[in-house]
Image: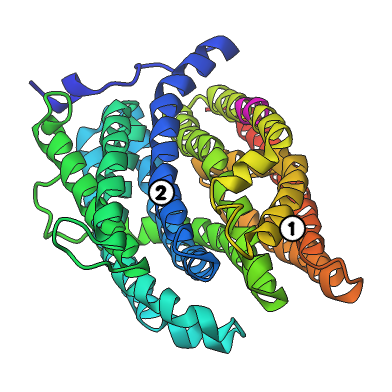
């Protein structure tokens, strides 16, 4: 069987909105479920650590925000592998598909080194940023355990980009969902001490996540190497060969994409740091709201990843109309989902907050009450949050990554963080002021990115094949 015989995507792009939605759903559906499962793994860590106390929750919250922001940035760089592989797939170039994946592995190795360095010195970094000294020992214990999952998760992301480009993401779903139970079991054993092991506290949650990252990588690598539909690509053949030209292309497109991710995740991390300046209770409330919203956000994040591949597939076929259609279908799908998400948040905010902290435990009532207020604000900016990430993915499919970075810097940091800091500390709105700044920053960014995709895709259509 030749590699071309094992491809999963259609030979031509759908020519109707309904057809494109069906194609998007085939990729984004399992991918979204897998992303939610990944967040469930992180959610499990947070809920279990929250049972240790609000200080432990705050420590894991701020370090998870910082460390996983770094991981998110690195993942955004290697996500360009999906764009290159999808274009090659549209041309029936199976060697090009595999080559993009192999070089993505090497880019991942380079990106891991600064992540490990920052992770090792997380305590002095947090101290320099003015965080509460009481959380520093917990923060260091957690990050020095979880950071060893950085590289395997990046490699897993590269393989996931392969599956997305080929339109076959069901294995990603099954592997990730299976990892939830593994993570839960390891957390209970490591955090609280079972099966003859001592209680490790927050460090146990970090080691559990690291083991799960390696398990997910090995499972997806086995799928890529052994499955009938994928083994023909031989993605692990000649792994030692580094092609600087392809690596350069990944970095040329990926670094601005990573910069956009840094602008976004850094925006949320900066907001969390400002919460830490306000106090540990504000930081813990912020973590509750962010963790739940991040879980809901996994669906538009998956749609964004799928949109990159669908738009790139259209461009690979030299069908700019199909690429434009794919982008707008993806954005419309994200808006519809986030309207549903906002409704859920408005309906049960207290129930959501109580998932993370025991309301009967001393000192938790204040945190829960503030978390409910933040969730109300979050419900208002849900649609903008989903729209901006999908518009970013669609633009990435057009290989347009530099201007979106500039838009993100202006929207998140000038409009969002600047306004939030002013409301919180100048006008005295406190934690709520920071979150109203988030709302403005996301709305500005979403609007500008959508207009950018409309203009760029229209020019591509006018230019013709």
Q: Give the extent of the magenta segment.
A: 332-337
Instruction: Report whether 360 appears left or right of 101.
Output: right
Between 426 and 265, the one lying in front of the other is 426
Q: Is residue 402 above or below residue 350?
A: below
Q: Callout 2: 10 Å neighbours few (<14), some, many (20+)?
A: many
Q: Write the residue at 61% across / 42% down.
A: 352
Q: Write the residue at 17% across / 19% down.
A: 5
Q: Write the residue at 47% across / 27% down.
A: 314
Report helix, strand or loop for mark 2.
helix
Instruction: Report whether 144 appears left or right of 269.
Output: left
Residue 68 circle label: none
Label 1, label 2: how far apart the Cα atoms are: 32 Å
Q: Callout 1: 10 Å neighbours few (<14), some, many (20+)?
A: many
- Between marks 1 and 2 in the image, the one whose residue lies nearer the viewer: 2
Magenta stretch secondary structure, dominant: helix
Instruction: Report whether 344 appears left or right of 419.
Output: left
Q: Is residue 94 visible?
A: yes
């Amino acid at each position: 069987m030749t590699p071309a015989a094992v491809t999963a995507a259609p030979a031509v792009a759908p020519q109707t909105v309904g057809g494109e939605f069906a194609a998007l759903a085939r990729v984004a559906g399992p991918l979204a479920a897998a992303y939610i499962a990944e967040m469930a793994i992180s959610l499990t860590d947070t809920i279990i650590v929250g049972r240790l106390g609000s200080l432990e929750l705050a420590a894991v919250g701020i370090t998870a925000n910082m460390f996983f922001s770094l991981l998110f940035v690195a993942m955004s760089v290697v996500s360009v592998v999906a764009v290159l592989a999808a274009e090659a797939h549209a041309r029936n170039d199976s060697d090009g598909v595999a080559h993009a994946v192999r070089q993505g592995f090497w880019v991942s190795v380079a990106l891991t080194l600064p992540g490990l360095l920052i992770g090792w010195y997380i305590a002095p970094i947090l101290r320099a940023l003015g965080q509460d000294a009481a959380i520093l020992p917990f923060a260091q214990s957690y990050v020095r355990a979880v950071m060893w999952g950085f590289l395997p998760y990046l490699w897993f992301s590269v393989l996931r980009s392969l599956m997305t480009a080929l339109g076959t993401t069901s294995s990603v779903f099954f592997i990730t969902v299976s990892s939830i139970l593994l993570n839960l079991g390891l957390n209970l054993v490591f955090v609280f001490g079972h099966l003859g092991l001592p209680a490790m506290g927050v460090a146990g949650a970090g080691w559990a996540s690291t083991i799960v990252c390696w398990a997910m990588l090995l499972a997806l690598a086995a799928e890529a190497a052994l499955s009938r539909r994928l083994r023909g690509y031989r993605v692990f053949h000649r792994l030692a060969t580094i092609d600087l030209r392809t690596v350069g292309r990944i970095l040329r497109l990926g670094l601005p994409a990573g910069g956009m991710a840094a602008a976004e995740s850094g925006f949320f991390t900066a907001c969390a740091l400002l919460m830490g300046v306000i106090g540990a209770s504000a930081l813990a409330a912020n973590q509750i709201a962010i963790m739940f919203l991040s879980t809901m956000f996994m669906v538009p994040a998956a749609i964004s990843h799928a949109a990159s591949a669908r738009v790139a597939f259209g461009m690979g076929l030299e069908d700019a109309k199909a690429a434009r259609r794919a982008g707008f279908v993806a954005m419309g799908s994200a808006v519809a989902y986030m309207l549903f998400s906002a409704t859920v948040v408005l309906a049960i905010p207290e129930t959501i907050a109580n998932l993370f902290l025991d309301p009967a435990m001393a000192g938790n009532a204040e945190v829960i009450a503030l978390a409910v207020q933040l969730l109300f604000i979050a419900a208002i900016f849900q649609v903008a949050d989903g729209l901006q990430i999908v518009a970013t993915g669609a633009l990435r499919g057009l290989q347009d990554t530099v201007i979106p970075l500039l838009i993100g810097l202006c929207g998140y940091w000038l409009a969002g963080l600047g306004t939030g800091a002013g409301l919180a500390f100048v006008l005295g709105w406190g934690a709520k002021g920071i979150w109203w700044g988030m709302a403005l920053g996301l709305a500005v960014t979403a609007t500008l990115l959508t207009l950018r995709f409309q203009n760029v895709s229209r020019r591509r259509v006018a230019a013709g094949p």
